[in-house]
Image (cartoon, rainbow, N blue to C red):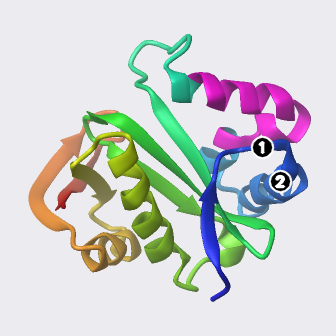
Amino acid sequence: MSELFLTEPSLKFQESMKTYALAYKKINDQHYFNKYIKALDHFQEYLNDLYNLSEGINLLKGDVTTSTYWMISKKEVVGVVRIRHQDVDCAGHIGYDISPTYRNKGYGYQILKLALKKSIEVGIDEVILTCNINNTVSKKIIEKNNGKLLGTIFDEEENDYLYKYCISR
């Protein structure tokens, strides 16, 4: 696996991020495609939104300050991680996704490992993570990064059960 790193969103990776968004459209994953759709036609606005979210500017009701990073491999965005500066019920501190194009290659483990280092910079010592109980890949990624299962919780918004984990340092 080539050298991986997290970077703040920037114009430098505009074309790669567009490819990233379209990968979700290609597999008809509306949830993630909708997260990135603005990057297709309004990239600067998309970057501005991410910056404002990272600074806690104009947060929508229920949102918390959230730093977004792109994981880069060979000049391509292969994953996106969001570090919430506060624990959010049913979402925890960290949420991440790997482009459908790059799945099943170990990137999930790496993005969480790198995000845990970044979370220290934001002042989070005890990271809370959640994953759908049917998402065995995410469960393995969290546990491989020393996640300790706290139990299950019910997410009313998603009408589904989640595993809740803690990673302490």
Which range of residues does the magenta coloring cover?
35-52
Work out which quarter of the rendered image holds the N terminus and state it. Answer: bottom right
Tag 2 residue: 13
Element marked by disc 2? helix
Residue at the image position 86 percent from the left and 50 percent from the top = 12
Element marked by disc 1? loop
Residue 57 pos. (x, y %):
55, 14
Residue 104 pos. (x, y %):
56, 84
Give the quarter of the image for residue 105.
bottom right
Residue 79 pos. (x, y %):
62, 62
Residue at the image position 32 percent from the left and 58 percent from the top = 131
In the displayed structure image, the side of residue 54 where residue 101 appears, left or right: right
Residue at the image position 28 percent from the left and 53 percent from the top = 129
Of residues 55 and 108, which is closer to you in this image? 55
In the displayed structure image, the side of residue 12 where residue 84 appears, left or right: left
Please, is residue 163 above or below residue 40 in the view? below
Instruction: Tell me whether the residue at label 2 lies in contact with that at label 1, contact meaning CB atoms closer than 8 angstroms.
Output: yes
Tag 1 residue: 10
